[in-house]
Amino acid sequence: MEHIHGTYNSELVILSYVIAAVASYAALDLAGRVSLAKGMPRNVWLTCGAMSMGLGIWSMHFVGMLAFTLPMHVSYSTGGVTLSVLLAIIASGVALHIAGQESVSMRQLIVAGLLMTVGISSMHYVGMSAMSASITYQLSKVILSILIAAAASFAALWLMFFFRHQHSRSTWVYKLGSGLIMAIGITGMHYTGMSAAQFQNGHVMVKHSGMQMNPDMLAYLIAAGTFVTLGFTLFGIFFNQRLSQKDQRIHENEQWYQALYHNHSDAIISVDREGYVKGINAAVTRITGYEEQEVINRRIDHTLEHVEIYWQNDMQDVAWGEGCLDQQNYNATMRVMDGRLRDLHISVVPVLIKGNHMGSHILIKDVTEEKQAQEHILHQALHDSLTGLPNRRKLDDVLAATIASSELTGQQFAVMVMDIDRFKMINDSLGHSIGDIFLQEVSDRIMAAMQAWDPKAEDNVMLARMGGDEFTLVVANDQRNEIGVAELAERIVSAIQLPYRLKENDFYVTASIGIAMYPDHGTEADSLLKHADTAMYEVKKNGKNGFQFYTTQLDSELYERIELEGYLRKALERDEMVLYYQPQIRTEDSRMIGVEALIRWNHPHKGILPPNVFIPLAEETGMIYAIGNWTLREACRQMKQWHEAGGPLIPVSVNLSSLQFHQANLLEQVQHALLETGLEAKYLELEITESMMMDASVSAEILNELTSLGVKISLDDFGTGYSSLSYLKHYPIHKLKIDRSFVTDITENRSDQAIVATIISMAQHLKMEVIAEGIETKGQLDILMQNDCKEIQGYYFSRPLPAQEVEHHFFVPLRLEDQS
């Protein structure tokens, strides 16, 4: 047979490539659509996609065959054409099915690629067999075409699998490029297969029943139909993608909303316009204890009624139905399922759709811990951290409110200012930690005294700590007026003076209380506090351990005190301080054996002032250190001068105040005074009181240091305080001084006689010297001498005298006596 050689229509060849490229691009898009669909929509997309892609591939094949022109008439078998179309659709379906899966194994990919290769190759060669021509094939080119089909199939599968979830703006560019590459593979397979065909011309041409149309026209019609089909496919993909994107956004927004709704820390209850619960989140159960099935489709007011909500706002203002167009906020207290009371903040947020109210979201925030934290912070701001009592800020608020209330009712109330006497000594000697414990016990005692005075004291009395050892009470009217307030003050004073057990020792303090009454002593907070403070200082001035109501007379005394303080600050500079000396006498021969230095203030206007007038003021203002140091140096200087003038060689006694005893440089001050004046240490006697020795370790250290210098220690006013005999056992004390309070009534009071006799006997057994002060009568002297008291001091022999008079009346006679 004779081989027939055909020619190609270049326009149709290009058209076939374009069809292949468009079909490939559509296939890549279809793969993504199939992968996103689930269930029946996936099957629909898979079927339609397979048909569209298969028709596109077949159209490229058929247009490619029509592009080949033979020098004879060629028709096509309808059955063969139909079979080739089905094979193209099946191959496309396999490809889309594999590409649309979530994951594909290598084995599945190979099987699918082989099936596609078989399908495409079969489509081509079945389509070729539909031609009404005798065709033989070159085996090598057929195999090559099949290999090209395989390469195109595997490339198509990989590209479809890769691009199915790519949705960036530049994805279409990559898909287009990939489509062009796939088209090269598809058309390459077709035209390689065409080149493998050898058409032969026999002597008879059999006319098959087939298509009787101009091949070029048929090619263009098929191409047009294919483009229309693919165009509809791509448009469907685009339209569906837009809808899917919209659905995806709606779904994502819904997921965001659901995540916020269900995971929100606040309880959310959704109700319709009729007030029926349509949904709740998990926080509702956590906060209220109610499960979802207990509230869903029930009216919200019934639900709230069952959880016993006590509203702070009027619930009648809440509108669940129409008209609730603005957000409403409420504070409430809810008793939840476990019986606890919870503080809540509730917001009712309306749901508006096109301006119509469709329901509400009720947001319930549990603010219990937040409120407790706020209350704790407020409590800390208004209360003392050490004692838990109200502080100055809280006192100001309560005092202002009490004044406002009393202005309306006309009732009076009292302001009591209290100071703990000798607290500074405890704080300095025992340390701040022990001082804190002491203040806590003081506040407990005051509270107990208040309760004993009035069981409803918490309602009628407020106790505040102003700082340090100062307390203030606001005592509301209890129908007892000043008498009732005085009774309360007495109870507090009695409670405070009981012993305190600190560091395994008993310590004693007292309280000084000043009282001001509203409105008699002031109508404003400042004036009431000021006048109560003035009364309190009057108590301190008069010996402490008591209370006093304010009087107008105290104002003038306060002014005098302020004026006195101003002069006192300049007294040392002006050389106004002087020392008086009182001789100490030996009873057996009435000889002077020592003197006690007693300070006086030669005031420029008031004359000579005794120490009880200005020493408390000096201690309060801190001037006691300078005055005490001056007294020590002056006494040593004067005694050294008397010694140098001929004696006699006797000691001088100097009183130390509590503050002076605990000053850090006491030892240095004593050494400096002795060195500066040249007085031998054995002629200096320092008088201390029992109250200075509260802390055994501190006091012992100070006393041992002083005695190591050669200075002697005298315990003044022995027996008047809360004495501990351990002082005498452990401390280096050389002399006891019997206080004048035991001597004054010694001629009439047998108890005083017994106490004095006991002290003298005890001192003698402890190898200590003993001296009695305040001797004013012969009878007192006789009793002391009968009890073997060898040293006395008092007005019976001499009052305190200036240095010149003491020298004239006592030192000079002794010098003359010694000379004779």
Image (cartoon, grey):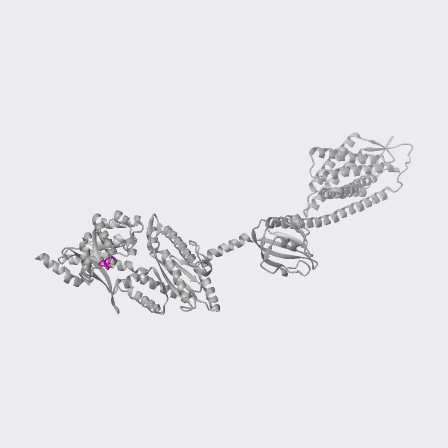
Is 245 displayed left or right of 769 in the figure? right
Closer-to-camera residue (145/336):
336
Rendered residue at 60%/54% (across/down): 308
How many labels sit on residues? 0
Image position, residue 701 (x, y; %)? 28, 48
In the rendered image, the residue lying farthest to the left is: 820
Image position, residue 240 (x, y; %)? 74, 48
Is 582 displayed left or right of 259 in the figure? left
Q: Is residue 628 magenta?
A: no
Closer-to-camera residue (440/95):
440
Image position, residue 610 (x, y; %)? 25, 64
Image position, residue 814 (x, y; %)? 12, 58
Quarter residue 196 falls in:
top right
- Which part of the image, by quadrant, shows the N terminus? top right
Compared with residue 13, is residue 628 higher up or lower down, i.e. above or below?
below
Magenta residues, dominant SS class: loop
Point out the stretch of residues depicted in magenta: 742-748
Closer-to-camera residue (125/656):
656
- Which part of the image, by quadrant, shows the C terminus? bottom left
Quarter residue 129 falls in:
top right
Is 358 displayed left or right of 504 in the figure? right
Is residue 594 visible in the rendered image? The answer is no
Compared with residue 89, is residue 576 higher up or lower down, i.e. above or below?
below
Rendered residue at 33%/64% (across/down): 538
Is residue 339 visible in the rendered image? The answer is yes
Is 291 displayed left or right of 2 in the figure? left
Quarter residue 655 falls in:
bottom left
Compared with residue 474, is residue 732 higher up or lower down, i.e. above or below?
above
Q: Is residue 743 magenta?
A: yes
